[in-house]
Image (spheres, grey):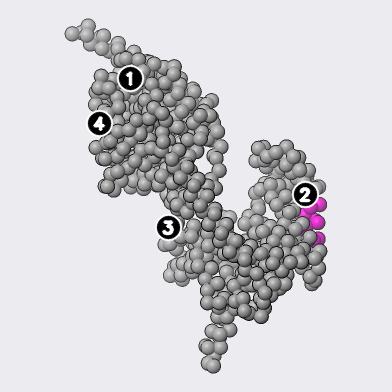
Amino acid sequence: MSLPGRIAAAVFRPWPVSRGGAIATGERLAAATTLTSSLEYLTQRHQMRSGGLNDWRVVKDVQSKSTPLTRKLLDLVSDERATTAVHAARALVSAGMLLPGSSRWRGAGSLFLGASTALLYPRHRYGTDGSDQVSVLVQTAAGVARLSTSPQVKDAALWYIALQSNTSYLVSGWVKLIGPSWRDATALGGVLRTRTYGHEGAFRLTRKYPRTARWVAHGVLALECLFPVAYLGGGRLVRPVVASAAAFHVTNGFAMGLGRFVTSFTAMHPAVAYTAAPRNHPAVAGRDDRALAVAGATLALAASAAGVVAVQRRLRSREGWPTSRTMTTRQGNVLQYEVMSPGKPGRPVVVFCNGLGTSSEYFSWISEHLAQQSGYGVITFARAGYAGSSRRSTEPYRLDESVDDLVDLVHGAVAADRRVVLVGHSLGGELCRRAASRIGDRLHSVVYLDSSHPAELNRSEQQGEAAKRLRESLTLMVWSLRLGMGALMSRPEWLDSLPEHYRLRAFAQYSDLRTWAAARREWLAVEEDFRAFSGDLTPIDAPALMISAQQTTDRDPEQLLMHNELAQAHRGGGRRVETMVMEGANHEGLLVKAEYAVDVASRIVGFLDAATADVSASDVLEGQTR
């Protein structure tokens, strides 16, 4: 056989790792991870003291919602002396695990290391990473395998490690593939130039040899996305796949300072080699592969359950309220809306327009207050694609489509003899601004709640940089929900700030694929539209109220300037224009937190009363003049 043939034969063949060898190698590599971790913490004890990165008096606030028993246990282990003692014990046990031997006591050692890592995780919230999580996984499974006398249990534990290894690479790769920066290979240079993970020399190489850098980036994607091919061809690909993965982690350890990743992730590779070998190979004779079938059945059941949850949430999201109505717009879209209050005859009707990725439920504190206490008419609705509204238009989406829908809603849902107040939050504010000039004499006033501005992506460096990240996040959410991950979504904290009877439906909408797909569709149109904006805002002949969230303007002062410009576009002719900053509020909290939202509602009512009085006085004066 020729030399190339001998090399190919040596590379493309199974990796004959025995059951005992896979357990022993994995537990030692995981122990090396734990040893490194504890030695790092012991040499950086100042980070645990007052003012340090992991000052427990500050970090413990994250555990405020844990059970009292959990908090007491964490307080006990998080005392500096207790934490130091645990790390010292971990270092001692880890060092012992590196010694030769196959005693069952090694299983107890692995379980201790895994449990102590999990226990210390809240203590070292800042500084822990994926390597610690992987070591817990390997040590728990290796500990169970070492303590058990059943070959079937040992094989199940090794299959668990192997499946977790495949999943970690597979998910990481496909998530990267969603982001355009990995597809166009710019992500590699971007990571290497950062302060946290950067390496100046490596970054310069990516700039000097861009074609090679592109091949490297695409190679990483291919490795992660195709890691399970190690199981094809009777395990003939396991050596090049595992060797490539190990080389990837070694490179990361050197260039990005992720040293613990080298031993933690490679600790899973022996289990991959053991499970990838054909069952007739002498090294794995008698291997029990039922765990693979159990995992497949479990995955199928989980997928079915996730599907049922998604259907239930979709139905709840779309069903609307008992008072919900629908109408069809000129675009063919079907809008679902609610007349929360018809209001007193002659008084304006307030129409709420939600922001990107949100629903009318976000306005619940404000809309309920106005409907019950103000005497103004109140209408809320869902834009096409949200909640119970359907987008039927076949044209590519543009912001003007939503503006047309809003104008049609006003003409179709509000009596012809009533004037209209448009209230918009975030992107909804910009849609209201554009709709204002199309409503004509029926427009009473516009209320902007922390509104978007069409020039914000060009003028605000912060907004411009965040735009790309938002696009990628929305894409990731859409694909995650398409894969059934919605069942794993937890309730966001802000949701519990809404009135209780709105929470269930708000969460159903939040976790529904349609919401995020609509948000992504709108955001792509926003980027195109806002990037092309230039010039001045069109003057609007109507009173206006601008309410900004303090955290928005503090974080980005340019936003306050743009909010003032929105208000300025309404000035002239003696029209009432008011601006204010809601102290302490953030972008969403302005609506969902009662402490701010009730105040916002009161200010809206006060503004509308004053603006209505101005109009009445003007009409009287005009009549006297005549």
Q: Are marks 1 and 4 in contact (CB under 8 Å)?
A: no
Residue 438: assigned label: 4
Instruction: Assess whether mark 2 and mark 3 are in contact (beta carbons under 8 angstroms).
Output: no
SS for tag 4? Answer: helix
Q: Earlier in the sequence, mark 1 or mark 4?
A: 1
Determine crowd level at label 1: few under 14, some 14-19, many 20+ residues with C-alpha closer than 10 A: many
Which stretch is magenta? 85-95
Mark 4: which amino acid? Arg
Separation (CA) of disc 1 from disc 4: 17 Å
SS of the residue under disc 2: helix
Nearest the camera: 345 or 567? 345
**Residue annotated with mark 2:** 83
**Is 88 colored magenta in this rendering?**
yes
Task: Please tell me whether residue 415 is drawn above or below residue 18 in the rendered image.
Answer: above
The residue furthest top is 624
Dot 3 amino acid type = Pro
* Closer to the eye: label 1 or 2: 1
Percent from the top left, x then y, of residue 593? 52, 29
Q: Position of residue 106 (x, y in %)?
A: 78, 64
Q: Residues within 10 Å of mark 3 (few under 14, many from 20)?
A: few
Q: Earlier in the sequence, mark 2 or mark 4?
A: 2
The residue to which callout 1 is attached is 348
What residue did someone put label 3 on?
A: 180
Q: Which amino acid, mark 2?
A: Thr
Q: Quadrant of residue 438?
A: top left
Q: Is residue 412 left or right of residue 322?
A: left
Tell me if 592 is positioned left or right of 573 in this view.
right
